[in-house]
């Protein structure tokens, strides 16, 4: 094996490793619709501290982000994340929090909406509400069909 071929192998293997490292954490995140079991991985990736509490038929995983924003993931124990909510001085990484529903959000932002401080997306099977101004943002996204029986939308904040 020549030095040139060894160098090509090393370059291609290191490129594959870097790609896997970049994509790996994104695949492990607890996002809207993902299994609850990945919530702890989400806290690690976001470099936040996690606190979990039971609320009857669901669990809330609160992740305090370094920015000061509080990201809450609502999940059925042993099931899936049915809602996410945030409040604080910065909007969290919505691509990560919304997962596969992120494209519905981005498509909605391209459409005409009312005001600069409020956004509401209502699609079949997905709802997102976001509002705020500099250093004071709030929002939530949820899957109406996945809400546990007896859960009020007022609880998702």
Image (cartoon, grey):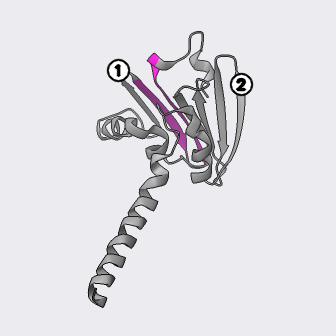
Q: Residue at 38% of width from left, 37% of height from top?
A: 100
Give me the residue at 47% from left, 44% from top. 94
Is residue 139 found inside the magenta-colored segment of the image? yes
Q: Pick the residue in front: 105 or 17.
A: 17
Question: Mark 2, residues whose alpha carbon is within 10 Å: few (<14), some, or many (≥20)?
Answer: few
**Residue ID at (49%, 53%):** 25
Residue 125 belongs to magenta span = no
In percent of width and height, residue 138 lies at 57, 37
- Image position, residue 141 (x, y; %): 49, 30
Give percent across and percent down for residue 145.
Answer: 44, 16
Which quarter of the figure is the C terminus placed in? Answer: top right
Question: Which residue is the site of mark 2?
Answer: 54
Q: Quadrant of residue 61?
A: top right
Q: Residue 124 got which mark?
A: 1
Region in magenta: 126-145
User: Farthest bottom residue?
Assistant: 3
In the displayed structure, does residue 6 sit left or right of residue 57? left
Marks 2 and 1 in Cβ contact (< 8 Å): no
Q: Which of the 4 image quarters holds residue 55?
A: top right
């Amino acid at each position: 094996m020549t030095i040139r071929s060894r160098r090509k192998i090393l370059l291609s293997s290191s490129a594959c490793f870097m790609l896997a490292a970049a994509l790996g954490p994104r695949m492990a995140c607890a996002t809207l619709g993902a299994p609850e079991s990945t919530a702890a991985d989400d806290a690690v990736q976001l470099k936040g501290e996690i606190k979990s509490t039971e609320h009857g038929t669901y669990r809330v995983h609160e992740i305090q982000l370094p920015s000061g924003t509080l990201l809450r993931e609502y999940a059925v124990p042993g099931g899936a994340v049915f809602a996410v909510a945030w409040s604080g001085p910065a909007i969290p990484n919505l691509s990560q929090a919304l997962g596969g529903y992120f494209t519905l959000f981005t498509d909605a932002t391209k459409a005409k909406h009312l005001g600069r401080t409020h956004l509401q997306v209502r699609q079949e099977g997905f709802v997102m509400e976001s509002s705020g101004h500099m250093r004071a943002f709030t929002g939530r996204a949820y899957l109406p069909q996945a809400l546990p029986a007896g859960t009020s939308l007022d609880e998702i904040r």
